[in-house]
Image (tube, helix red, strand yellow):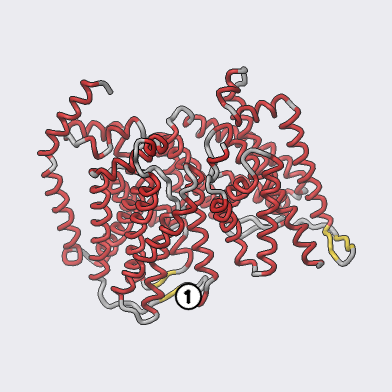
Amino acid sequence: MAAFVQILIGSVLQGGLYALGAFGLSLSFGVLKILNLSHGDFLMLGGFGGYFALVYLGLNPFVSAIVLGAAFFLVGIGYHQAFLARLSHRTPQGLLVASVMVTLGTALAIEDLTSFLSGGAPVGIPYRLHSLTWGGAVFPVLRLILLAATLILTIALYYFFSRTFLGRAVRASTINRDGALLVGINIRRIALFTFGLGTALAAGTGVFYATLFTVEPFMGLALALKYLAVIVVGGMGSLPGVFVGGLVIAAAEGFTAYYAGPRWSPMVAFAILVAALLLKPQGLLGRE
Amino acid sequence: MDDRDIALSTARDARAVHSVRPYWFLAALLLAVASATPWIGSRYHVSFMFLLCMHLAMAATYDIVGGYMGYINLGHGAFFGLGAYVYGATVLRGGNPVLGLLLATTAAGLFAGLVAVPVFRLRGVYFAIATFGILKLLEVLAANLEPATGGTPGLSIPPTPSTLPTFFLMLAAAVAAVGLSGWICRSRLGLGLITVREDEDVAEVSGVNTRWIKRRMFMLSALIPGFVGGTYMWQITYVDPVSAFGFEVSFTPIIMAMLGGTGTLAGPVVGTVFLTLVEELLWSRLGYLQLTMYGLVLVFIGLVMPGGLMRSRPFAHVYRVLAIPDHYGYRSGRRRP
C-alpha cells in the first residue's frame, strides 16, 4: 500500500512535468503548424544546465530553473527566428518535410554534442532535502515542493491562457489562424512569444526533471514520443487535458516499472499511443 | 504552368524517350564495375561497396513511403534491425542462410503490415513520431527479450569463410531497391503515390484507393530492408539493440535520401554516394561527432534546399540540357518538394 501511494505521488510529479513539457510543444505546434522534434532536447539542456549550475556555481535548482527558463526563452526566440520563421511560407507538404529536417537535424546535433561534451552519462541534480514520514509512507520534502511548484505553474499558466489578453491571443491563434489575423492579432509576434514560452517551460521543467530523475543526452526524441502520447490521450492544446494525459502516462509508467521491472517502462508510452489510435478510429485528425 | 509549357514539356518528354538509352548503358557499366569489385579491388573496397549498397538499398526503399508518398517514416531502420535479428535467431537455431534471409524478409513485411493499421491513422509529423516510436519499441524489445535476442549484449553467429555471397546479395538488394523506385516513378501506382503526397483527400475522392496504397507500399518498402538486415547479419555476424535500431543505422539512409532529394529516382542514389564517400573520407577519420555532422547537414538541407540536391537550381539546369523526362519528378518537385 505504501509503495502504491509512493508510486502514485511519483506519477503525479512526473505527470506534471510531462504535461508542462508537452503543453509548450502542443501550443507552439498550434500556432506555427511546426512540430518541434528538438523540444525534448531543450528539457534535456535545462536539466544539464541545472546540474552544472549546482555543481560549479552552487546554484539552488529552484533559482536555476527560473534563470534557465528566462535564458531559454531567448534561446527559443533565437531558434525560431533563425530557423523556423524561414519555413513558414512553404506549402503544407514542403513545410512538413523542411520542418522535420530542421528540427530533427537540430535534435541530432544537440544530442550528439551534449553527449560529446558531457561524456554521455545520465546526470541527476544532487540536491536533496529531508523527508517526512506519515502513515508508513515517506514523503521527501523536495518532491512535495516540486509538486507544489508544478501545480502553481500549471494554475498560473491556466490563468494566463484564460484571463489575459496575450494568453487568449495565443489560444485564438491556435484555434483559427485566419480568424485571429482578421481581428488584428499579430500572428508572427504571437508565434515568437509562444515558441519562447514553450522552450522556457521545457528548460525550467528540465531542471525539476533532473532533480527528481536523471537526464541523458539522447532522451530528447524519445520524449517527443511521450509528448505525442500525452497529447493523443489528453487532447491538443487544452491544458487540463494535457495534464490528465501526462498523469495517465506517468502513472502507467510508474506501475509498469514497479510491477514488471523498470526495463519495460520505455514501452508504455508507445503501447498507450497505439491503444489510443486503435480505439479512436478517426485518430487525431477526426476531432478537428 | 500554362498550355504552352505543357506542350513543350510533352515534346521534351517525347524526345527524351530516345535519349534514355545512354543512361541504361551508364547504369550497366556502373553495375559491371561494382560487380567486379571483389576481383579488381582490395578488401577495403569490397567492404566499402558493401556499406554503400546497404545505404543505397535502405535510402531507395525509404524513398517509396518517405518520398513518393510523402509520409516521413523515421522508423524505416526498424525493418533492417528486425531482419538482422530474425536472420541471427534462425541461423543460431540451425537454419541455413537462405532460410534466414527468407524469414528476415517475410518478418519485416508482416511486421510492416501489422503496424500499418495504427500508424496510418496519423498524418504528417505525428506519423513521423509514431514510426520513430516503432523503432524505440523494437529496441526495447530487443534488449528485454533475452531468450530470443540475447538482451543488451546482443547476438553472435559463427562467421562465414567467404564475403562473396553477402557482397552480391547486398548488391542485388541495392539494384532491386533502385529498380523498384524506378518502376514506381514510371507506373500508374507511382502516380497514385504522388497524389497521396500532394493531397490525400483529393486523391481519395478522385478514386485512388489511398488506404490500400498506403498499407501495401509500407509493406513493400519493408521487404528489402528486412533482406538487407539479414545480409548485414550474415556478413557482420553480430548484432545488438543499438547497432540494429540506433540513430546511426536508422537515420543515416533517411538523411542520405533527403540530401539527394526524396521522391526522385536519382536523389537517393546521389545522396547516398555523396554522403557515404564524405563519411568514409572525412568523418570516420575524426571518429566522433558524426551524428552532429549529419544533424547539421539535415538542418542545412531543410533551410536551403528542402527538395534536395536533385531539385536544386544547378541540377535543374542539367536536366533541361539532358532533356530528362518530367515523370522522374524533378520539375514538378521543384515547385512542390
Residue A155 figure quarter: top right
Image coordinates of residue A127 in percent, x first then y, are 77, 56
**Mark 1 secondary-structure assignment:** helix
Residue at image location 23% in from the left, 35% down from the top: B326
Classify A56 as above or below A71.
Answer: below
Q: Output the chain of dot 1.
A: B
Classify B144 as above or below A110.
Answer: below
Q: Quadrant of the image for the N terminus of chain B?
A: top left
Q: Would residue A226 be found to the left or right of residue B67 on screen?
A: right
> According to the image, label 1 marks what residue?
B148
Classify A161 as above or below A129.
Answer: above
Residue at image location 52% in from the left, 75% down from the top: B146
Q: Residue lying farthest bottom?
A: B94
Q: Would residue B273 be found to the left or right of residue B28 on screen?
A: right
- Give the number of marks: 1
Classify A32 as above or below A247.
Answer: above
Residue A72 seen anywhere in this rendered image of the structure: no
Q: Would residue B306 be found to the left or right of residue B292 on screen?
A: left
Residue A143 figure quarter: bottom right
**Amino acid marked by disc 1:** Ala
Image coordinates of residue A8 in percent, x first then y, are 76, 59
Q: Quadrant of the image for the C terminus of chain B?
A: top left
Q: Which of A124 and A43 is in front in this view?
A: A43
